[in-house]
Amino acid sequence: MQFEALQARYGDCLVLTLPGTDRPIRLLVDGGPAGVFRTSLKPRLDREAAQFKNEKPLAIDAVMVSHIDEDHILGVLDLFGVLLDADQKHAPRPYHPTWLLHNSFDALVGEGEGGTARALGGETVLASIDAALDAAATARSETARLVLQSYGQGSKLASLSAALKIGRNPPDQSVLGFHANKPRVLKLGEATLTVVGPLQEDIDNFQQGWRDWKSKQKDTASLAAYLDESVPNLSSIVVLLESGGNRVLLTGDARGDHIMQGLEGAGFMATRGTIDIDICKVPHHGSARDLDVDFFQRIRAKHYVASGDGTYGNPDRETLEMIEKARPEGGFTFHMTYSAEECDAGHKAWRANRKGPPFDQDRDGITQIITNWKHGGKIAVEEGPIQISL
């Protein structure tokens, strides 16, 4: 198995290649924000196509979009756009995805595609979303604003996948979530992907909240409050991939406590309350917002991967401190898609355009921690585009 985290600025773009019978099995997880398809993902796919010249088009067995935030979905939209352009020109597709693994907002609330926008009551979909965005801005609701901004991207992805005849969420297109009584297990060749998030309880609560909003309140200000309260629990599809005795935890931007709850419910942490895995994609680009020390105490990986260039402060200094506190004995590798110096520069630039205190190297920087790890000999560090072979 090979795991790659491409340089995707402040987003995620992961390429996993697994052993197959006559060719590698390929899984693409997220596509990063604007520009990442052109700078990172397309060159990577084209190198793969050059290596496997007999595959025309290059097979991509599954594309997983963990959630609809622009730093995860835009590169996939660009990829699907290239395929649609080829079809419209009656030219051969350069790549061929078989499955799309994705929970659209409409699917999560139990509406048909476009149903959420229609429920908002505007004359058009765009008018509906614009009105809701204005209410979110008035309420200073950041979560609601991000969800509504990304809604159109999720709808576009659904339309593109239908036009390209790419199947969604096998076997029956239903929402991907964790069911305690019967965890959903997908197959990719000989590999399995066990869905451990989002939790079905949160999906049910989300749908009930949506029904309550439609039947009782139906104003955009209350919608912002509903989204703020409910969406963080549904932020990402989380899967544990197992192949050839190796385990990879793909987390998107999910909450650490919910990830552990799903792993426990699926029986992966039953023995000692911990799980040993090969690779853990650190949630939310290394943000400390939804993590605690026990996440790293209980999810014990040989490799932790944090994608981010310092924008939004990620990877967070506090997250690195949690890792060091949780596993002081070391014996693992911490991977970053950009160098610590680049992350600190990105953090400083991002902080300069925000209210509050400016970036302080001693308080906010990660360079000194990474330097200490490199020299300490307990925790190995790798910086730059990530390639891990298992």
Image (cartoon, helix red, strand yellow):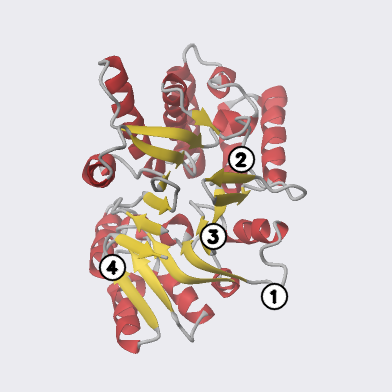
Q: Which residue is mark 3?
A: 290
Badge number at residue 176:
2
Residue contact between numbered discs 3 and 1, judged by CB atoms under 8 Å:
no
Give the mark, 1 or 4, whose residue is nearer the N terminus: 1
Q: Where in the figure is residue 253, as x and y percent of width and height?
A: 49, 52
CA distance separating discs 3 and 1: 23 Å
From the viewer's side, name the closer residue of 292 and 275.
275
Check disc 2 and give the amino acid type: Leu
Sooner in the amino-acid sequence: mark 4 or mark 2: 2
Q: Disc 1 marks which residue?
A: 272
- Residue 383 marker: 4
Residue type of the residue flagged with mark 4: Glu
Q: Where does the image place residue 40, in percent across and percent down from the top left?
A: 25, 47
| First reached walking from the N terminus: tag 2 or tag 1 | 2
Residue 266 position, x and y percent, is 70, 56
**Measured Cα–Cα span from mark 3 to mark 2:** 21 Å
Mark positioned earlier in the residue sequence (3 or 1): 1
Q: Secondary structure at mark 1?
A: loop
What type is the residue that disc 1 sits on? Arg
Instruction: Find residue 200 and report its image quarter.
Output: top right
Q: Are marks 3 and 2 in contact (CB under 8 Å)?
A: no
- Residue placed most toward the observer, 170 or 41: 170
For disc 3, the neighbor class at 10 Å (few under 14, some 14 to 19, many from 20) is: some
* Residue 138 appears anywhere in the view: no
- Contact between marks 2 and 1 (CB within 8 A): the answer is no
Within-10-Å neighbours for mark 1: few <14, some 14–19, many 20+: few
Q: Residue at x 57, y 47 (%)?
A: 232
Q: CA distance from mark 2 to mark 1?
A: 27 Å
